[in-house]
Amino acid sequence: MSSENGPGDGDAAQAPPEQLALIRESVRKAKAPRAKPRTWRGAALAEHLPVARVLVDKGVLHLDRYFDYAVPAELDADAQPGVRVRVRFGAGRHRVREGRREGGGLVDGYLVERLADSDYSGPLAALAQVVSPEPVLSAELLGLARAVADRYAGSVADVLQLAVPPRSARAERRPSPAPLPPPPAPDPGSWARYEQGRAFVESLAAGAAPRAVWNALPGPSWCEELARAVAATLASGRGALVVVPDGRAAARVDAALTALLGEGRHALLTAEAGPEKRYAQWLAVRRGAVRAVVGTRAAMFAPVADLGLVAVWDDGDDSHSEQHAPQPHARDVLLLRAALDKCGFLLGGWSCTVEAAQLVESGWARPLVAGREQVRRAAPLVRTVGDEDLARDEAARAARLPTLAWQVVRDGLRHGPVLVQVPRRGYAPRMACANCRAPARCRHCAGPLQGEDAGTLRCGWCGREEGAWHCPECGGFRLRAQVVGVRRTAEELGRAFPAVPVRTSGREHVLDTVPDAPALVVSTPGAEPVAEGGYAAALLLDGWAMLGRPDLRAGEDALRRWIAAGALVRPQGERGTVVVVAEPTLRPVQALVRWDPVGHALRELAERAELGFPPVSRMAAVSGPPESVAEFLAAVELPAEAQVLGPVPLPVTPPGRPRRSGTPPPGEHWDRALIRVPPGSGSALATALKTARASRTARGTAEPVWVRIDPPDIG
């Protein structure tokens, strides 16, 4: 090395590079070394309330409780009740260093409260991270989650997975708009058509909490009527929440609210909005910037401040039943909210479920209905085509289209579009008396009888074999499984009416609206588009395919779907006509002809009370591998008055077929048992089932079983 490059010369001692100088300067100015967020080892704790009580998002029943963690001083400001946090979970007592528990995996959670001391006597692990300083879990929402978890034998963490949407950092950084002052009280509008409609709206505007079951008149006015109920609640300075079954219904209520109140007074919470936009809307509600919410099923947990009204539309729709654990129903969650928040409650629909009728019969809610003359003016004319008519009808045998239906469709196409409702595929019929069509039921538990390959009858609930069945209604001994084809293709109708366009609406492609022009609109139940000005006529085909389903709610559900289609038809005074192809003597068909869903629901409720069926009784379904179900039933400590029906084998899911919640995986054989308790014992049943499941989960050796409280389909 030459002397020019040697380090000994004073001129050679050159200044350090700029980057190195910056590093040295930062080291000189640095404070005491910070503890690593991985463990916060050696970090000072918060001086005030150094213990954080955390709800860990594990979702397993034996961990459905709170856990205490230490709060480092550096997280003191952000670690406030309601924020999302990350904690170390799963470390044993032996992993303690410098007085702090270490180890375990990082899991998400919610900080519930800050405490001065912990009930736990050992060393605490520290909060690993405050994910966001945005408080998303209020005390009211936590209380609701706990109530829902207790009712459905689930965990609070599972409920909060449904209640709190995933975080979006960009949405959190954007400020929410300033809240608007309460609007003026609206006039009753079309609520005046109902006997107590005007009083209901005025009661909401005055700050009261009325509870009503609303049987809406046919037509499109239900959206505007819901909007006026929300506006009346906002006028009293309170918040409102409306839950509808699908995005199409939510868009209609959204448009009605915008037309009545303008922009910025309500939030629309649907999956179609996307995660970021939906979270931004949810935050606006949580921060109090918006006082009204319209949304689909997940909106039942929306954190509306100072709740004054909760409303659910068409509670019989399957979409209101959550498929993720613990599978709550929107109607029941809103009932809990009405009780916890002491707010108004509105259950509405064109039809009436048995649960809605029970609310009125018990006195908990009051009926909100129109007079019979008003109903007759708003409803279409309903005509029936039964088996005897089909047997005498040459056209029906040749073209599978009854003459009466053909004539109504032909006349309707002269004035506008005609709706044709076709049952979706997959409806399996139940056994019924060949003479009077009364459903065949078990003498022991009143469950549905099912035919097997060997020609024997077996109960679908308790599994008992029935060898000497006879009909209690007419005394007949012959059974029939009414099988009617469920496909009415657009090609068949196109051949019958070659000069008319045919549109279809179903699972693959659902139409929202159709123009007021002659056309045939073929739709599955629930996918019927709205016609501008209403349909001129409607044809409801294959009624037995829906009435013959092996389900307790088959008649109620068929009537609900028929009325939903008929409500889109013009009134009888405008020549609106509905033709239903079903036996006219059956109770649901008679209720449709009279347009009396409330009377049908009351009769169903009386029969279920006599037989001990839901909703008069509470019921739970336990399904899983046969050995697991038998072991679970032997271990669970059920209430003394509980009755176990079954277990019975479940149908095997074919390979490639989508699996529904509670059904066996493709190719596996599962059993199902039903547990029934009388009124007043539902809470004890849920507690017993939850305790037994938690015990099995804690052991970790037994194969899990699937438990569902109040299953929607019990056969």
Image (spheres, rainbow, N blue to C red):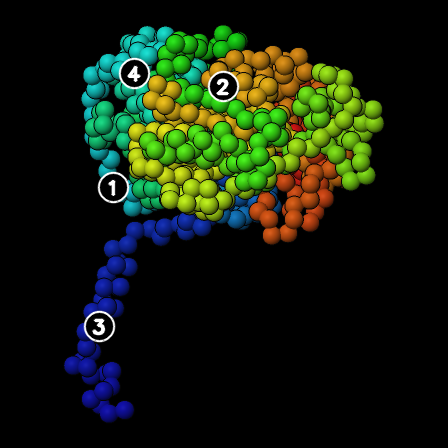
Residue 244 visible, this angle: no
Mark 2 residue type: Val
The first of marks 3 and 4 along the sequence is: 3
SS of the residue at dot 4? helix
Left or right? Give the position of 607 relative to 88.
right
Read off the residue under disc 3: 17
Rendered location of residue 155, percent (x, y): 55, 32
The Cα atoms of the two marked residues, 3 and 4, are separated by: 80 Å
Read off the residue under disc 1: 174
Read off the residue under disc 4: 190
Q: Residue furthest right?
A: 467
Q: Quadrant of the C terminus?
A: top right
Q: Residue furthest bottom?
A: 2
The residue positioned 41% from the left and 49% from the top of the image is 37
The Cα atoms of the two marked residues, 1 and 2, are separated by: 54 Å
- Dots 3, 1 in contact, CB < 8 A: no
The Cα atoms of the two marked residues, 2 and 4, are separated by: 24 Å
The Cα atoms of the two marked residues, 3 and 2, are separated by: 92 Å
Nearest-to-viewer mark from 3 and 4: 4
Left or right? Give the position of 417 relative to 180.
right
Q: Quadrant of the N terminus?
A: bottom left
The residue positioned 80% from the left and 33% from the top of the image is 456
The Cα atoms of the two marked residues, 3 and 1, are separated by: 42 Å
Rendered location of residue 483, percent (x, y): 64, 36
Mark 1 residue type: Arg
The first of marks 2 and 4 along the sequence is: 4
Read off the residue under disc 2: 593
